[in-house]
Image (cartoon, grey):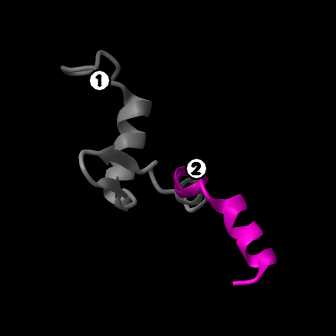
Amino acid sequence: MSTLGRENRAEEDGTGIRRMREGAGEQGYPEPEFSADGFFTAVFQPLPTVSEQLILEVTQEVGTKQGPSSNP
């Protein structure tokens, strides 16, 4: 590896977690979860399905009121 290649690689060392978080966010994915219990693990969650997203949006818009509405 050339000296320039090593310098570029050294600049990237230590930025993996930040780059994974940024990459997931840029694509609209939830932030990955990290753990280190003997092994380093990064867990990436899938995008919510359209129905899950709609349920979330409607729930936030309507709220959590229970029972019949007093407005006809």
Instruction: Determine whether the residue tagged by mark 2 lies in a helix, strand or loop.
Output: helix
Are there few (<14), some (14-19), or many (20+) residues within 10 Å of tag 1? few
Name the residue at the right extreme. 4
User: What residue appears at the point 72 percent right and 59 percent down from the top-left corner?
Assistant: 11
Horizontal side of 35 relative to 21 (left or right) equals left
Residue indicated by mark 2:
18
Horizontal side of 13 relative to 60 (left or right) equals right
User: What residue appears at the point 37 percent right and 58 percent down from the top-left corner?
Assistant: 44
Q: CA distance from mark 2 to mark 1?
A: 36 Å
Residue indicated by mark 1:
64
User: What residue appears at the point 40 percent right and 60 percent down from the top-left corner?
Assistant: 47
The percent position of residue 29, horizontal first and vertical second, equals: 47, 56
The percent position of residue 69, horizontal first and vertical second, equals: 28, 20
Q: Quadrant of residue 56?
A: top left
In the displayed structure, would residue 65 be above or below residue 37?
Answer: above
Q: Of 39 and 42, which appears nearest the observer?
A: 39
Q: Of 55 and 15, which appears nearest the observer?
A: 15
Instruction: Indicate the quadrant containing the N terminus: top left, top right, bottom left or bottom right.
Output: bottom right
